[in-house]
Every structure is written in structure tokens, then in C-alpha cells.
Image (cartoon, rainbow, N blue to C red):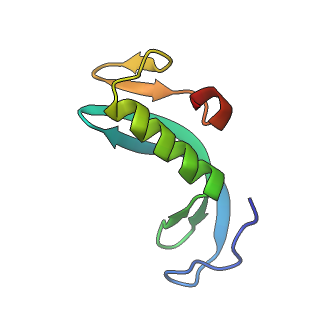
Amino acid sequence: MTPFEKCPICGSEMVVKEVEKLLRGGLNTATVKVSAEVCLRCGEKLYSQETIQCFERIREKLSRREVSQFQPLGQSFLVTSCVLESLA
């Protein structure tokens, strides 16, 4: 991921951090840890195209209730990897 020099929202500095993203699909919810560019001032998060595609695949699987490869976490699921090949 190539970091933006400045936040597109407020113009402040962006840094790469690991963040948690909450995804919903149908009645199911998953938490995914991914790398994102985060604004130090306003907190805006920017994700790579590959990460966004991974989010879409996870949401589809959640909607179809195909959650056997996800780790249960209470009433939701923890996705330990955002690798596209493992979610195909």
C-alpha cells in the first residue's frame, strides 16, 4: 500500500496502522484486522483495493451463511486473515 501524503478529508498526515473493521452480511457480523492508512487528526481510514475486495467477499459469505471457515466470536465471527485466495 502506498501511503497518501495527506488526508483527503482534512489534509493532515496519514500513517499506516493495523485496524479492526466490522463487517455485516445478512444477520451475521465479522471482525477483521487489516492494514489501513489512518489520518492522525480526523481518523479517516483508507483501504487498499485488495482489502476492499476482501471485505466484499467476506460480506458475501456472511450473507450466504458460509461461515464455517470463520472463528466464532460470541454471536459474530473473527476473520483471522484477509487473504483473497482463502475466501474464494
Q: Is residue 1 left or right of residue 50?
A: right
Is residue 20 visible in the rendered structure shown here?
no
Q: Position of residue 84 (x, y in %)?
A: 64, 37
Residue reaching furthest bottom?
Answer: 11
Q: Is residue 85 above or below residue 70?
A: below
Q: Quarter of the image holding residue 46?
A: bottom right
In which quadrant will I find the C terminus?
A: top right
Q: Residue at x 60, y 49 (%)?
A: 51
In which quadrant will I find the N terminus?
A: bottom right
Q: Is residue 81 above or below residue 69?
A: below
Residue reaching furthest left?
Answer: 27
Q: Residue at x 51, y 73 (%)?
A: 41
Q: Residue at x 39, y 42 (%)?
A: 23
Q: Residue at x 56, y 69 (%)?
A: 39
Of residues 53 and 23, the one nearer the viewer is 53
Q: Position of residue 11 (x, y in %)?
A: 57, 84
Q: Is residue 4 left or right of residue 87?
A: right
Q: Is residue 6 above or below residue 58?
A: below
Of residues 83 and 88, the one nearer the viewer is 88
Is residue 75 visible in the rendered structure shown here?
yes
Q: Position of residue 50 (x, y in %)?
A: 64, 51
Residue reaching furthest right?
Answer: 2
Q: Is residue 73 above or below residue 38?
A: above
Q: How many marks can you see?
A: 0
Q: Position of residue 62 (x, y in %)?
A: 37, 31
Q: Is residue 12 left or right of residue 10?
A: right
Q: Is residue 9 left or right of residue 65?
A: right
